Amino acid sequence: MLGTFQDELVSVFGASIGWFVGHAILLTALVAAVLAIRERDHVIKNSGLGRSQAIDFGIFLLLTLSLFYFYSTVCGFASGPSLVVGAISTLFLRWMVTILG
């Protein structure tokens, strides 16, 4: 699951300790996800983020992914630059709508 990062862990720590560290990382991520899901009401209530921020983030993701698809398939850009250009274009568009009206 960790891909080449697991290979790097094995090369740094050896096979057995690298395996243990890799599994500890996965277990920690799983436990954090379970705790976040269990305590979601507490997290939502005390995070300081509201419905408007969630909608804003959702629109940002949707528009960024749409622009990423456009830049990578239609324009033929590589994936990394397409994602960066899509995110920057989305932020610029949000700025224009928010500031310039």
Image: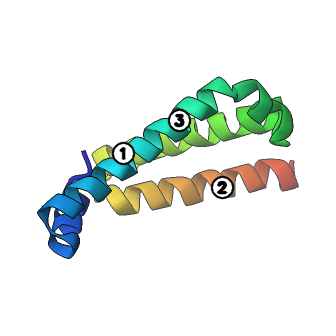
Choose between 6 and 59: the one closer to the eye.
6
Front in this rendered view, residue 61 or 44: 44
**Residue to which mark 2 is pinned:** 91
- In the foreground, 91 or 31: 31
Whether residue 70 can be seen here: no
**Circle 3 SS class:** helix
Residue at x 47% of width, y 61% of height: 84
Q: For marks 3 and 1, give the CA distance.
A: 11 Å
Mark sitting on residue 33: 3
Q: Earlier in the sequence, mark 3 or mark 1?
A: 1
Element under disc 1: helix
Determine which quarter of the picture holds residue 69: top left
Q: Position of residue 52 (x, y in %)?
A: 82, 34
Q: Earlier in the sequence, mark 2 or mark 3?
A: 3
Upstream in sequence: badge 2 or badge 1: 1
Which three-letter amino acid code belongs to the residue tagged 1? Leu
Place of residue 96 in the rendered image (x, y in percent of width and height, measured from the top left): 76, 54
Which circle, 2 or 3, is nearer the viewer?
3
Q: How is the image coloured?
A: rainbow
Q: Which mark is residue 101?
A: none
Classify mark 2: helix, strand or loop.
helix
Judging by the rendered image, the residue that carries numbered circle 1 is: 26
Question: Residue at 80% across / 41% down in the picture?
Answer: 47
Q: Amino acid at mark 2?
A: Leu
Q: Please name the residue shown 54% across and 30% down the image.
A: 34
